[in-house]
Image (spheres, helix red, strand yellow):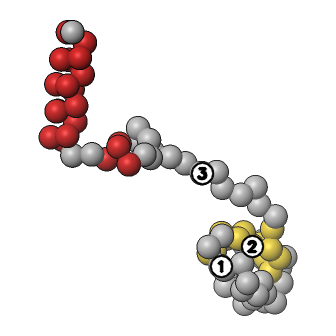
């Protein structure tokens, strides 16, 4: 679900909320209860990957990774 930013034209209160794309736009300010909300055009959010990567092999067990290092050392010695 996308995050939408809203600003009250009456009191100036700004906030963001999660809404489905098919949901109607909010109109009532949660702070002053006036029907003066305006949905703002946002910049959107970037996709963030945390950690070393997102591949299946990045999350292998510790024992698998140890064996993999042993195998690569044996190959390098040959």
Pointers 3 and 1 in contact (CB under 8 A)?
Answer: no
Which residue is outermost to the top?
78
Q: Nearer the viewer, residue 24 or 64?
A: 64
Relative to 26, residue 76 above or below: above
Crowd around label 1: few <14 · some 14–19 · many ≥20 (10 Å):
some
Quarter placement of the C terminus: top left
Residue carrying label 3: 47
Q: Name the element at disc 1.
A: loop
- Image quadrant where one finds the N terminus: bottom right
Note whether residue 6 is visible.
yes
At 31% across and 47% down in the image, what residue appears?
59
Mark sitting on residue 6: 2
Instruction: Report the residue marked by disc 1.
Output: 19
Horizontally, is 17 left or right of 23 in the view?
Answer: left
Residue found at the very far front of the displayed protein: 78
Question: Alpha carbon of mark 2 to alpha carbon of mark 1: how far?
Answer: 12 Å
Q: At 70% from the left edge and 70% from the top edge, which residue is drawn? A: 4
């Amino acid at each position: 679900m996308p995050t939408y930013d809203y600003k009250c034209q009456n009191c100036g209160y700004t906030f963001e909320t999660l809404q489905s794309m098919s949901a109607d736009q909010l109109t009532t300010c949660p702070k002053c209860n006036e029907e003066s909300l305006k949905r703002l055009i946002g910049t959107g959010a970037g996709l963030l990957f945390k950690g070393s990567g997102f591949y299946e092999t990045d999350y292998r067990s510790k024992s698998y990774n140890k064996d993999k290092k042993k195998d690569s050392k044996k190959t390098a010695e040959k």
